[in-house]
Image (cartoon, helix red, strand yellow):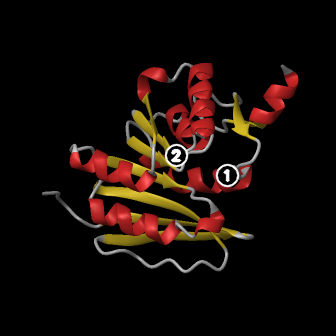
């Protein structure tokens, strides 16, 4: 059993704030989790957007960012990832802290799921996107969020990217903040649309 667990998850990350601060979460062994330093900087920048918000944790991996949002008072989080293994770890993490009532877990392609949720009238106040670095999906993610109109008025999109990637502000969005932490960057855009049609 110990061998099987080692294959499924490498180590635990801790929730750093809110009602579940200090709780351990599983992380699959072969994904790149958001570092503690990146999380610290991220939530210092966006913490006041979190309470009662609807959040999408895109490319969610282990769900660490979305669960951090729930711990800090988010109303509901959609966890989206195409990997069956990651989705199982997300479900385990949600169950371990008792966050099932405020979580929706979706396995599938992130871009298709954004389109599907938007077409059903779903809006998000906060979208967190930490795509695999080697895939160069950061700019495509920003463009897709803008295209679908899934952000609520004045909602924010946070994209983590690697040093050297060039990200441009999509139409209908305003760049709020940008931070570099070594080889990792954070870019935060806000919807500049006052209404949705």
Q: Which x, y percent locates residue 178? A: 55, 71
Question: Quick check: 189 left or right of 171?
Answer: right
User: What residue is disc 2 on?
Assistant: 82
Question: In the picture, residue 25 is in which quadrant?
Answer: top right
Q: Nearer the viewer, mark 1 or mark 2?
A: 2
Q: Residue furthest left?
A: 197
Looking at this view, is 111 or 148 the one in front?
111
Question: In the picture, residue 135 is in which quadrant?
Answer: bottom right
Label 1 to label 2: alpha-carbon separation? 18 Å
User: What residue is disc 1 on?
Assistant: 34
Q: State the mark number for residue 112.
A: none
Please tell me whether mark 2 sits on a helix, a strand or a loop. Answer: loop
Q: Which x, y percent locates residue 45? A: 54, 57
* 1 to 91, vertically: above or below: above
Q: Which x, y percent locates residue 142? A: 42, 66
Q: Is residue 185 visible?
A: no
Circle 1 crowding by C-alpha within 10 Å: few under 14, some 14–19, many from 20: some
Position of the N terminus by quadrant: top right
Please tell me whether mark 1 sits on a helix, a strand or a loop. Answer: loop
Comes first in the chain, label 1 or label 2: 1
Question: Quick check: 153 left or right of 40?
Answer: left
Residue that appears at 62% across and 59% down: 132
């Amino acid at each position: 059993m110990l061998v099987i667990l080692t294959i499924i998850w490498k180590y635990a990350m801790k929730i750093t704030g809110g009602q579940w601060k200090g709780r351990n979460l599983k992380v699959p062994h072969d994904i790149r989790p958001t570092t503690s330093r990146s999380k610290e900087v991220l939530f210092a920048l966006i913490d006041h957007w979190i309470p009662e918000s609807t959040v999408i944790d895109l490319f969610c991996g282990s769900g660490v960012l979305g669960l951090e949002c729930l711990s800090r008072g988010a109303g509901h989080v959609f966890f989206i990832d195409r990997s069956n293994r990651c989705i199982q770890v997300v479900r385990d993490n949600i169950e371990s802290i008792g966050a099932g009532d405020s979580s929706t877990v979706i396995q599938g392609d992130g871009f298709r799921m954004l389109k599907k949720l938007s077409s059903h009238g779903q809006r998000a106040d906060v979208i967190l996107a930490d795509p695999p670095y080697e895939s160069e999906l950061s700019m495509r993610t920003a463009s897709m969020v803008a295209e679908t109109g899934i952000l609520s008025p004045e909602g924010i999109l946070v994209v983590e990217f690697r040093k050297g990637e060039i990200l441009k502000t999509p139409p209908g969005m305003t760049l709020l903040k940008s931070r570099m932490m070594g080889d990792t960057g954070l870019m935060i855009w806000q919807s500049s649309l006052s209404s949705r049609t």
